Amino acid sequence: MKIYLGSDHGGFVLKQKIEDYLSGKGHEVVDVGCKTEESCDYPFFGAEVARKVVGDGGSLGISVCGSGLGISMAANKVKGARAAHVNSVELAELSRRHNGANILSLGERTKFFDPWEKIIDTFIETAPEEGRHERRRDQLNEL
């Protein structure tokens, strides 16, 4: 699976761990930045992950900032992006299955209900459902 990965300085340490974890599992990881813990602005990196994912069908994205909120908001400004701020396996599964999320947003400085590795694995392994959820995703696309 090709996964675009991005963070600001507040998510840099977790982003590096995620990159190592995913690469170790055989995924193709493309790091769009940031490259250091020096202060930088999350909107750029959230939007960059989103642009890459939207432009590369079948890929997924992971974005990380201190809270996971700002970077997900930035990603969701890109048409076709569906970033979900998640802190549990349950939400990772539902965001993919029901909402067809294509970007997982995590907060490095926040609490996780489940290990981030399990959250990521669930997000990657869960496919969007068809039927009523597909209809609702189509409605989201029209907004």
Image (cartoon, rainbow, N blue to C red):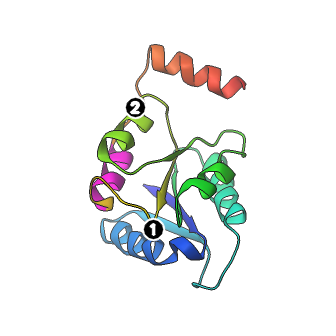
Front residue (pair 103, 55) = 103
Q: Label 2: how many residues lie within 10 Å, few (<14), some (14-19) or many (20+)?
A: some
Q: Quadrant of residue 14?
A: bottom left
- Look at mark 2 in the image and give the residue it sits on: 97
Left/right placement of residue 45 relative to residue 58 reads right
Residue 107, compared with residue 33, is above or below; it is: above
Residue 31's disc is none
- Look at mark 1 in the image and give the residue it sits on: 109
Front residue (pair 126, 9) = 9
Amino acid of disc 1: Arg
- Indicate yes or no whether the magenta region holds residue 1: no
Q: Main secondary structure of the magenta part?
A: helix
Front residue (pair 3, 106) = 106
Left/right placement of residue 118 relative to residue 51 reads left
Left/right placement of residue 66 relative to residue 34 reads left
At mark 2, the secondary structure is helix
Q: Which residues are magenta?
A: 117-125
Give how far across and how far down residue 72 sits, in percent. 59, 51
Q: Residue at x 38, y 44 (%)?
A: 92
Q: Residue at x 65, y 49 (%)?
A: 73
Amino acid of disc 2: Arg
Give how far across and how far down residue 93 sits, in percent. 35, 39
Residue 136, compared with residue 47, is above or below; it is: above
- Indicate yes or no whether the magenta region holds residue 122: yes
